[in-house]
Image (spheres, rainbow, N blue to C red):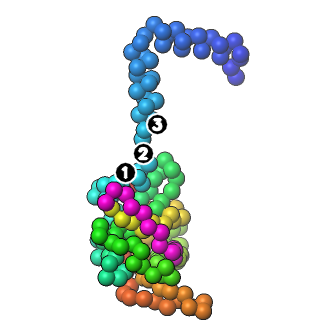
Amino acid sequence: MQTKLGKEKGKKMLEHTIKSNPRYLLLVSLLALFVCSCKPKTELYLERGLDILSNKHELNYKINEDVVVKELGIIRDQKEGIKTLVLKLNDSAIVNAIDKDIIIGITVWIIDENKKKRIEKWDFIPKFTQVNKHKYIMNEIKIEEDQVNKMKIFLYKKNEGRKNKIGPTIILNKVNTYND
């Protein structure tokens, strides 16, 4: 455990180093600027239109005449401690053309590290995001595993507590939830 005297001595040594070596001050300043200006990984992928995301899947899933889901990817941001399911839309998508009652249904089949199978539902109401010219529907997901064995994607509306499926269903096999 450091004593008060030890802390003061360390502080004086640091002040002396900075005063006697201006390059040290420049280096510390640049390092602080770099650390503070780093963007979250999710933001970088979105700005680039998912072009460098290693685990994306091409879909061309038509929600309606104006909105097409071009790609699906999962971004794992270890620094932020989150995983985000990202559906990239066509750049000309008219986001207010989607019925507000539509829900995106996603069912995933997962095999955990103990070879135990489980099924999860990641249904959500679409929320739109635009970054530069790219348009997305995104949803944060909770999953520890690095891979989903199977993923089923569909649209539905709720009517008197029942799900009324709309349009086609897409099934993807082996979807990675990491991208490092």
Q: Is residue 115 above or below residue 13?
A: below
3 or 1: tag closer to the N-terminus? 3
Quarter of image, res 161: bottom right
Q: Label 3 is placed on what type of residue?
A: Cys
Residue labelled with disc 1: 44
Question: Is disc 3 in contact with disc 2, using a CB cutoff of under 8 Å?
Answer: no
Question: Is disc 1 in contact with disc 2, using a CB cutoff of under 8 Å?
Answer: yes
Q: Position of residue 31 (x, y in %)?
A: 42, 29
Q: Position of residue 9 (x, y in %)?
A: 62, 11
Q: Nearer the viewer, residue 97 or 42?
A: 97
Alpha carbon distance from label 1 to label 2 = 7 Å
Mark 2: which secondary structure?
loop
Mark 3: which secondary structure?
helix
Q: Residue at x 71, y 16 (%)?
A: 4
Q: Nearer the viewer, residue 148 or 92?
A: 92
Q: Residue at x 50, y 86 (%)?
A: 157
Q: Magenta segment, which residues?
A: 122-133
Q: Position of residue 5 (x, y in %)?
A: 69, 12
Alpha carbon distance from label 3 to label 1 = 15 Å
Residue labelled with disc 3: 36
Alpha carbon distance from label 3 to label 2 = 9 Å
- Asked whether 110 falls inside the magenta stretch, the response is no
Q: Counting other residues with Cα less than 10 Å from the Cα at mark 1, is it few (<14), some (14-19), or many (20 or more)?
A: some
Q: Label 2 is placed on what type of residue?
A: Lys
